Amino acid sequence: MATTREQELSAASAQVFDASAELARLERLLDKLERGVVDEEVLEACPDLAEVKTRNDKLAYRRTILQRSLDERLASNAAAAAAAPKKQPESKMSAGDAAKAAPEAPSEEVLKRRDLITRNLQEVLGGDKLLQQLTAGKNMHVYWGTATTGRPHVGYLVPMRKIADFLQAGIKVTILFADLHAFLDNMKSTWELLENRVKYYEASIKALLQALDVPIEQLHFRMGSHYQLGRPFTEDMIRLCTQVSQRDALKAGAEVVKQVDSPLLSGLLYPLLQALDEQHLKVDGQFGGVDQRKIFILAEEQLPKLKLGKRWHLMNPMVPGLTGGKMSSSEIDSKIDLLDPAELVTRKIASAVCERGADENGVLSFYQFVLLPIVAPADVQIGGKSFSTLDSIKAAFEEGAIQADDLKETLTEFLNTLLGKVQAQCDTPEMKEVLLKGYATVEERKTSLPDRPTVSLDATCTQHLEALIGGAKLVGEGTESLQAALTTKKPVKVLISLAPKGRFHLGMVAPLLQIRKAIRAGVPVEATVLISSLEALLDSEKCPWNAREPRAAYYAAVLEVIVEHLGIASAVKIQKDFDLPWYLSNDYALDLYKLASAVTRDESALLNTTSSALSCNLVPLVYALNAKYTETDVIVVGEDTTSTAQLAVKLLHAIGSHAPTQLAVEIVPGMDENKMSCSSLDFLLDPLDTPKQTKTKIARSFCEPLNTERNVALELARKVVFPLMDGNALLITRAGDNGGDVSCASHDDLVKEFSVGSNPAFPLHPADLKTAVVNQINPFFDVVRAKVPDQAKLLAAAFPKVQGKKK
């Protein structure tokens, strides 16, 4: 039996290994196809492509022959023309106009600067734009960013060597310390720790450049948190999230963000933040490792859609570690720290694998990416022999002319000499203190919640508690927040958040009726109706960016009339989110990123939508932040928001806040029996519809004789009509031969009249039931129709036509 199980496990392991290898092969092929790389592996996987390539090669050969023949003919014609008498050509264009029309050819000096900027790079995106700017004499600006997580290592010599080239070429260079990224990296760092790390990064980078004899007058340093938490940046981040899909964000960060089945939401935001750095640092281009390529592609594709411009991108090769693979601060044995003592550097290089014929050789990679570019054009001495190129070094090594120990000895001497200069500048009391504070052991930050006092409710508070809950469903933490508020004898702060995704409808009145019932029961209430335009924008741009203010103005105009008509205006404030002082503030933005670091992509995918936009995942985060920043005791939501309300508890705990009491009221049905929704214009009841439109919509709703199941009219009566009547009976008029008038004091009475009838011979007919509902809803709407000013103008602004359709 054991042998059989071992065989099964072995077979399963082999299948997993084969599947992993196949997946890696397919991902590699996809990446090559996206980059336009056509090699033997791609051709083998795509036979049709191989055939096309063969045809193209033949056509290219024929084109070469034809071009050569054409060039010879042109040269012959030019020689004949030169021998012929000169004739002044006629031209309608002046010499000045011709000069302006013709593109300026780059000078030799410009080409030299271009070559200096692009030498030793692995790839350049937007090289034409770079050359145009150089030719036009533009004062160019490039930035390079690094997250202040681990300590800088000798791999930084590669970008520093290139930055030296940029400075020599007369380009302004900004080095960005991505401290916000580091802060959010598993929430392991404190701001004090990061502030000291930034000081060390700046000092060590300056020391590196000075060790390379590079002037640093044109070098500037910025901290990401100084602008990435500001409102302009946050607004652009939100707009970009509406354009970028989850898949594209995940793909863009594939090389720099750890890939897991359900990544943290923050991992999907990082590529977008990096792309936006280009705009907010006001640069012409970005420089980074080739592992940043997909982020650069994202920036090139997406920023122009927001009219934020397109930059050029420069990529240096990645330095392999001593043990192979990418050199990383987290792999101690693979890297050499800038402050490693000489004996440790010697030991690390001596233990590095350096074998002939190996695909990965960390020692030779150091020569290729670090040593040779720095000493060029001088030769390097290895084993008593001079070399100027990597190929000559490799050839000598493979032939046995030099040994691995020779390679290691020269590399060790080079690095220890260079690092000695860096360490001399960093060996100060101030830097020692900075290092001590910046890389101190930090205990994992555990967010603690403030203690809640134990409260005891008297009879009045208990009555108020029951009145506020009043049939609603409790979601999340329970009633602790509400109980604490009631015992203070101050008004209970209640929040109703409405996202203006479309036309205002009757379903949005249900939370207000819940509040009115509590106020009528004597509960002291201070309610806020928050028009959350941000939620509507994030949800598949159901409220476009440029329509937020007029859409909110339309909602506010309708709500003001409704709360006045309900008699609760003195207890209810109507506020637009973008008017509040905390909206997209620095603290708000930081909390937003903290929440994104505390929730996964799948956990935050709660919207019932077909959209794949990354912005949809931010909606639950905004809901939680609205709860925090309004400092509310109670939130009243629809039952369809239950999942978001439950997630809000976890999110608020992640930033050290208790969740308020959350009450979910029943949703009002649309005329199609589903929930009343902004997306279903034909089935929602709009207060600004005409009385006839309202009557027609209700008349079309499902309502079978004697059937109380899925009966829209009965549900409207229970959830809206009776609450609006404030305890009065519903009078239904009928002809005498149809049983005469009936009066229903409650919804239960109405159900009985419809299902069996107080006179069984004349149960309530669907047409009479619908008429009774219309006769209560239309007068309520009439008040709105009469008092909302400039309705046509208000609606036109709130729903601007975009490309021939309403959006």
Image (cartoon, rainbow, N blue to C red):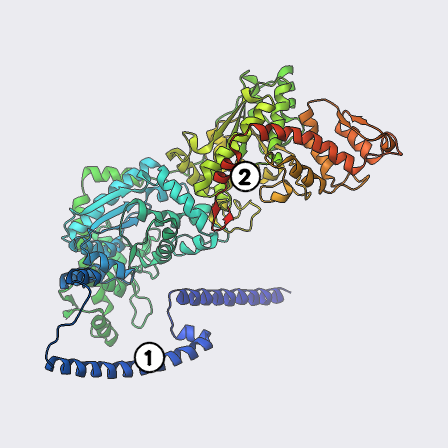
Residue 112 found in image quarter:
bottom left
**Which corner quadrant of the image does residue 396 belong to?**
bottom left
Q: Nearer the viewer, residue 284 or 355?
A: 284
In percent of width and height, residue 146 lies at: 30, 48
**Residue plotted at (72% across, 36% down):** 713
Q: Is residue 290 above or below residue 359?
A: above
Tell me the residue that label 1 is attached to. Answer: 60
Left or right: residue 287 compared with residue 770 = left
Q: Position of residue 627 (x, y in %)?
A: 50, 31
Tell me which amino acid carries mark 1. Ala
> Looking at this view, is 495 or 360 the one in front?
495
Relative side of 510 to 223, left or right:
right
- Residue occupying image coordinates x 86% and y 31%: 739
| Residue 583 in view | yes
Q: How far across and how far down the image is residue 493, in percent?
A: 53, 24
Quadrant of the drawing holding the N terminus:
bottom right
Label 2 sits on what residue type? Leu
Label 2 packing within 10 angstroms: few (<14), some (14-19), many (20+): some
Q: Are marks 2 and 1 in contact (CB under 8 Å)?
A: no
Using the image, determine if residue 560 lies above or below residue 9.
above
Q: Is 303 situated left or right of 769 in this image? A: left
Lateral position of residue 641 relative to residue 761, left or right: left
Task: Reply above or below: 119 against 487.
Answer: below
Q: Which residue is mark 2?
A: 647
Lower sequence index among marks 2 and 1: 1
Residue 492 appears in the picture as rendered: no
Element type where label 1 sits in the image = helix
Find residue 29 and report its horizontal and vertical position in percent.
Answer: 43, 68
Closer mark to the observer between disc 2 and disc 1:
1
